[in-house]
Image: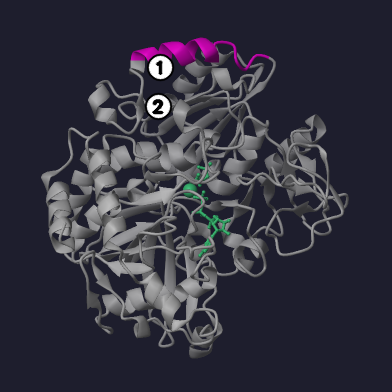
Amino acid sequence: MYLNKAVNEWVEEMARLTKPDNIVWIDGSEHERERLTKEAVASGELIELNQKELPGCYYHRSEQNDVARVERLTFICSSNKEDAGPTNNWMSPQDAYQKLGALFDGSMTGRAMYVIPYLMGPASSPFSKVGVEITDSIYVVLNMRIMTRMGKIAADYLGDSPSFVKGLHSKLDLNPNRRYICHFPEDNAIWSIGSGYGGNVLLGKKCFSLRIGSSIGRSEGWLAEHMLILGVESPDGQIDYVAAAFPSACGKTNLAMMIPPEYARKQGYKVWTVGDDIAWMRIGDDGRLWAVNPEAGFFGVAPGTSAKSNPNALLTTKKNAIFTNVALTPELTVWWEGMGIDPPREATDWKGDPWTSQSPEKAAHPNSRFTAPASQCPCISPEWENPRGVPISAILFGGRRSKTAPLVYQSFDWQHGVFVGATMGSETTAAATGQVGVTRRDPMAMLPFCGYDMGDYFAHWLNMGKKIPHPPKIFNVNWFRTDDDGNFIWPGYGENFRVVKWILDRCKGAVGSNDTAIGLMPKPEDIDLTGIENAVSFDAMRELLSVDNDLWAAEIADQTEFFKKFDRLPDEIRNQQSALKRRLGL
Ligand code: GTP
Ligand code: SPV
Ligand code: MN
């Protein structure tokens, strides 16, 4: 396949560098999928699962040292160090091209080079963008096939244009000492080497849609965000859309696919999924903020996904899915902790070792994942491929906070909402390598994904607020508050609908609020507890909605410490913090 002159020249140049045995142009056809799958099964890269139980499904185990994004090896390579900002690792473009160029030199010898044209965004949307990923991994090709609109559709969209994001990936020898994920925002290029896992290598996802995307969005006047998008259909048929930014493994997929509680279903409420991880948002002709999901599939956390917690996700993975680092049963089906069914007596764990239900170790890696087509999701929104996107009524920020943050509060206005997002914190998870469970500041859930200086990013958010005639209302949520024994107080999952309902009622001006120092909070009786009165007592509700001044004083001290890193922190953010302090009497 020949795409266009610009692509061809670049591919030839990369082939001269990486020296593959042959070049395979990916067209996205079914025939091609079959051929590559067969090849991957023959080489052991994939294991065919039980085709009766899981038709079209395959299993993959990555290297044990390669099971999550590695933020320490992820770089923004802008000419000026300052443009990468204080929260990103930086390498100069020259150093990065030289250092990685030496590693890429001959890295594909003995292997095929696959050239994947892919489209981020719906096929006929003017907002969509084309990337081309060069890789030596069939696993990457087959995952990109699910996660993006790949092959001919992207080639057609690109036409003769030289404007595409250039992604180069090689597994090399999967040696963590030779692993780098480098982004060149000035060249719209990504070079990733030495990994075979998830966000390190599926370059359309975090690398393009967020890191390069945020940088393009800033210059073009839109927002690329780590957000799910969902629609809530009311009994009268009206659908209101919400976008929500939670850090990795903090509940985006779950919220995006939630099933409303019985009382609400009976009234006729429904939840529709537009996206579970990324939102590209622009100002529409009507002055509202409109969002598209640039992806075509879900790369979701497996552990904890059960028929009870997220039946829609589970059903999405019943065919044509790839499972990575979960446990494999003797029947060639999959299992993970929190799947809601008894563990198999015997299995092979994510490391490939024998495992029994008596083993003290986890059978699935905590960051094990499924890759599945969004179109298979039972609650996929009829609007999910609408080229215009969907209009957003509310933006939610949230993280894992065992104490400090209440269940929900509304910001006073957009500018205050940006401050709320900018001061988000969350306890770390297994989605990135490193210590789990420590609180770190993670503005807008974008700390690992912003392609430029986060101070400039806050300024961009503040500016957008001035430009959007009818901006969404901004809220903060926290499903993860715990009691003194460490148990979650709020039941979470589908019950989160009750909070989203209050949020949408606020957007419509249909419910009041309590004015507090940190923002507008529900009156405890305004969160509908029908059906869970026994699980969530009135006292628990009061606890969930309480604001502890001592904790907030510590919170503000930590924010201040974080802000010290920034040379380009907008005054407005500092002013918002001063106002918060004043309101808290600090
Ligand atoms: P990424 O794909 O890494 O961006 O993650 P995500 O934000 O989509 O997170 P996901 O929905 O996959 O949830 C991650 C973990 O959080 C799973 O173990 C879930 O079971 C758990 N979780 C999700 N929602 C809730 C909730 O409302 N309450 C509690 N307690 N846990 C939740
Ligand atoms: C995340 O870590 O936020 C993910 C998984 O969605 S990854 O694709 O690895 O980035
Ligand atoms: Mn994510």
Labelled pair 2, 1 in contact (Cβ < 8 Å) = yes
Q: Which residues are magenta?
A: 94-109
- Give the x, y percent position of residue 99: 45, 12
Rendered position, 144 above or below 523: above
Kind of residue sitting beneath label 2: Phe
- Give the x, y percent position of residue 393: 30, 69
Question: Residue 96 bears which disc, if any?
Answer: 1
Based on the picture, tell me whether residue 448 belongs to the magenta stretch. no
- Give the x, y percent position of residue 481: 45, 63
The quadrant of the picture occupied by the C terminus is bottom left
Q: Main secondary structure of the magenta part?
A: helix
Kind of residue sitting beneath label 1: Ala
Q: Relative to the observer, which residue lies in front, 130 or 572?
A: 572
**Residue at the image point whose x is 52% and y is 52% from the top:** 296
User: Left or right: 103 with respect to 573?
Assistant: right
Question: Residue 259 bears which disc, if any?
Answer: none
Element class at badge 2: strand
Based on the picture, tell me whether residue 106 belongs to the magenta stretch. yes
Q: Earlier in the sequence, mark 2 or mark 1?
A: 2
Which label lies toward us, 2 or 1? Answer: 2
User: Left or right: 569 with respect to 180?
Assistant: left
Question: Callout 2: 10 Å neighbours few (<14), some, many (20+)?
Answer: many
User: Which residue, given by chain and number where applicable, does mark 2 sit on?
Assistant: 75
Rendered position, 203 above or below 417: above
Q: Gap in Å between the C-alphas at discs 2 and 1?
A: 9 Å
Visible in this render: residue 258? no
Element class at badge 1: helix
User: Left or right: 523 with respect to 14?
Assistant: left
Whether the residue carrying mark 2 lies under 8 Å from ligand 2 is answered with: no
